[in-house]
Image: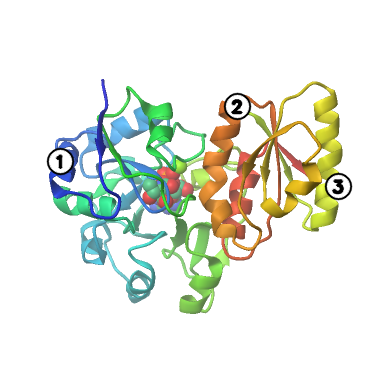
Amino acid sequence: MTVQVIQVDPIHPDPEYIRPAARALRQGKLVAFPTETVYGLGADALNRSAVARIFEAKGRPSYDPLIVHLAGAAWLERAAAVVPPLALRLAEAFWPGPLTLILAKRPEIPDLVTSGLDTVAVRVPDHPVALALLEAADVLVAAPSANRFGRTSPTRASHVLADLEGRIDVLVDGGETRIGIESTVLDLSGPRPTILRPGGVTREQLLEVLGDVAVRAVHSAGGPQSSPGTLRKHYSPRAVLYYFTEPEREKALAGMRQLIEEAVQSGKRVGLLILEEDRPVFDDLPVVTASLGSARNLWQAARRLYAGMRSLDEQQVDVIFVRDLGTDGPGLALRDRLQRAASKLIP
Ligand code: TXA
Ligand code: MG
C-alpha cells in the first residue's frame, strides 16, 4: 500500500485538499492527520473493520482503547450516552483543545474502540486541519497517536512516515504540531474527576474550572481497565534512556555528569535531552544534544521532547540522559512521559 501524502497549509487548509482525505475516511480507510498535540491515525469510529486496521497498523494490543475525535461539542451526543453538565462546562472552557473526556458511551460505539469498556474517550482537536477534516468527513473519527505501539508520538509528518509507511492510506501533512505531547485524559465517569493521563491541559487549568481533581499515579498493570498511558514502558526512544528524578538542579546535574563521563569512557555514544541553561555543564564532553529550550518555558520542552528523542535515535546514540523538570504546568505531563520512556530511573 502506498501512502498518499497531501500537503496542506496548517492555518488555512484548502478544502479542495481536505476533500480526498475526508472521502478516504468515509470509505473506511486509514488517514493520518495533524492535531495541536501530535499526529493522529484516524478511521471512521463506527466502522469496525476500519478501526481494526488501526490496531493492525500500529501493532497495538486491543485492550488499549481509542480516543474519538469530534468536530465540536455539538457532536457529543453522537458518542456519549449522557452528557453531564460538567462535561459541557469543560467543553466550553477547553474545546477545541487538548482535553479528552471519558464519558458513558452510546451503544453504537463499537467495543473495539473502547476495548469493551462502557465508557468512551472524546475530544475536539484544536487544529484547523483536523477540524476541517472532521467536518468534511462528518463521521466520528477514532484516532490514536500515529506511531507504532510503544514508540514516541509523531509531531511531524516525517515521524508518521518513519513508523507507518506502507501501513496507512493517506497522510495529511500540516507541518509540526504546536503542543507536542498528547491530550490530558480526564475521567468524568466516576464520582471524582480524575486525570488518567496528564497532557496539554494542565492540572492547574482544570482546577480553575473544577475546584477539585484527582491524579491517578503511573502503575504497571495491563488489561482493559488501565490505559496504555499506564503501561510502564511506553513512548520510548530506541536508545536506553536514563531519567534523573532528583528534583534539585545542582544535585541532578552533578549526578548526570558523573554517569555521562563513565558512559563516554566505556565507549558509549551519549545523547542528551537538555535545557539551554544546563548546557554549559556538559560543554567539554563528547555528547550529542537535543535542546528542550529554556527552563523558563516548559511548553518548549513539551513541543520538542519527542522530536528530540527521535533525532537522538537517528544519530544512533546508545544512551540518552535527561533530568526531571518539576511538576508546574506541562512539567507533570513531561514527568509522566519520561517515567514511561525511561529504561532506568536514577534517584
Ligand atoms: O492528543 C491526543 O490525545 C492524541 C491525538 C491524536 O488526539 N491521541 C492519543 O491517543 O494520544 P492514544 O491512543 O495514543 O492515547 C489514548 C489514551 C490512552 O491512554 C487510552 O488508554 C485512553 O486515552 N483512553 C481511551 N479510551 C479510554 C476509556 N474509555 N477509558 C479510559 N482511558 C481511555
Ligand atoms: Mg499513543
Q: Is residue 147 above or below residue 211?
A: above
Foreground of the two, 40 or 10: 10
Distance, label 3 to label 1, CA atoms, is: 55 Å
- Ligand 2 within 8 angstroms of badge 3 C-beta: no
SS category of the residue bearing label 2: loop
Judged by depth in the image, the label closer to the viewer, 2 or 3, is: 2
In this view of the protein, can residue 347 be seen by the observer?
Answer: no
**Residue placed under numbered mark 1 in the picture:** 26
In the rendering, at what x and y percent does residue 169 appear? 25, 29
- Tell me the residue at 27%/48% (across/down): 9
Foreground of the two, 148 or 300: 300
Quarter location, residue 32:
top left
Foreground of the two, 89 or 169: 169
Distance, label 2 to label 3, CA atoms, is: 25 Å
SS category of the residue bearing label 3: helix
Distance, label 2 to label 1, CA atoms, is: 39 Å
- Tell me the residue at 81%/37% (across/down): 284
Are the two marked residues, 2 and 3, in contact with CB atoms closer than 8 angstroms?
no
Q: Could you say which disc has been placed on residue 315 in the image?
A: 2
Q: Is residue 35 left or right of residue 280?
A: left
Q: Return the disc, 2 or 3, that comes first in the chain's sequence.
A: 3
Q: Could you say which disc has been placed on residue 173 in the image?
A: none
Rate crowding at label 2 as few (under 14), some (14 to 19) or many (20 or more) other CA atoms within 10 Å: some
Q: Callout 1, which amino acid?
A: Arg
SS category of the residue bearing label 1: helix
Q: Callout 3, which amino acid?
A: Ala
Judged by depth in the image, the label closer to the viewer, 3 or 1, is: 3
Q: Callout 2, which amino acid?
A: Gln
Quarter location, residue 7:
top left
**Residue placed under numbered mark 3 in the picture:** 254
Are the two marked residues, 2 and 1, in contact with CB atoms closer than 8 angstroms?
no
